[in-house]
Amino acid sequence: MTKLIDAVIPAAGVGRRMGATLPKQYLKLGRTTVLERSCAIFLNDPSVAHVIIALSSDDDVFDTLPLAGHPKVIKAQGGKERCDSVRNALSLSHADYVLVHDAARPLLSKRDLENLKQASFASKAGALLACPMADTVKKSSGISKDLHVSFTTVPRGDLWRALTPQMFERELLIASLDLAKNRGLTVTDEASALEISGKSPVLVPSLDPNFKLTTPEDLLMATALLQYQGEL
């Protein structure tokens, strides 16, 4: 039986660290916006039925994009936190599975997406793209301007950086997000909600660059990489 998949894109944030006049998802990456490039891989994937984009109530840019008129695109109300935006979007989905992806992560490759889908289908707890930590990890002495190492080097052997997409059965993700909210817990990614509900999602190693655009330097690196790949 064919499994129905929807993609959810929380895009209600403003990205203050980018230091731009527009939310970072609307900055240009070549001829299109970051958001359009982040959504394109799902819009072009025949296994994805809909792309549900959660937007801020005062968003006045999205409707000016060609993306707004795409037949697979559905708009959802953004929430105060990322988890609220995702939960609102899930209420508009009728799919068996959902892929949740950052609006400012425009470099997702087809092979990483396919590997993630297969891992999620085979798991009862979903899956997420992730990268093993390559750098030595230090714990700081605090959050003051004058930071020091707090006599701690964190063993990195079992540490991973969580990426997106993250893919789960829709009903399982809804139940997990609701459980976290009922416990007064704010989760920063969907896998965290599954962990709270006692599930252990599968880590799928990302084989290609898939970093999130947070600073102006990230935008420059993404532009350079896409130019090198001949995609700009």
Image (cartoon, grey):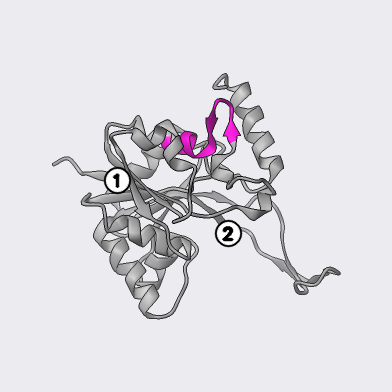
Instruction: Give the labeled residue for mark 2.
Output: 159
Is 29 part of what is drawn in magenta?
A: yes
Q: Which residues are magenta?
A: 28-39
Residue 71 image position (x, y, % from top left): 28, 34
Q: Secondary structure at mark 2?
A: loop
Judged left or right of residue 195, residue 230 is right
State the residue in front, 42 or 52.
Answer: 52
- Is any atom of residue 191 visible in this view? no
Residue type at numbered disc 1:
Asp
Q: Nearer the viewer, mark 1 or mark 2?
A: 1
At horizontal 40% and vertical 34% (from top left) the residue drawn is 67
Mark 2, other Cα within 10 Å: few <14 / some 14–19 / many ≥20: some
Q: Quadrant of the N terminus?
A: top left
State the residue in front, 117 or 34.
Answer: 34
> Which of the two discs, 1 and 2, labels the residue nearer the N terminus?
1
Is 33 part of what is drawn in magenta?
A: yes
Q: Secondary structure at mark 1?
A: strand
At horizontal 48% and vertical 54% (from top left) the residue drawn is 58
At horizontal 70% and vertical 42% (from top left) the residue drawn is 216
Mark 1, other Cα within 10 Å: few <14 / some 14–19 / many ≥20: many
Residue 93 image position (x, y, % from top left): 25, 52
Farthest bottom residue? Answer: 183
State the residue in front, 47 or 112.
Answer: 47
Instruction: Give the labeled residue for mark 1.
Output: 6
Q: Quadrant of the C terminus?
A: top right
Residue type at numbered disc 2:
Leu
Residue 217 image position (x, y, % from top left): 71, 41
Judged left or right of residue 126, residue 21 is right
Kindly report the distance in space between the C-alpha atoms of the residues bearing marks 1 and 2: 29 Å
Q: Residue 211: name its quadrant.
A: top right
Farthest right residue? Answer: 146
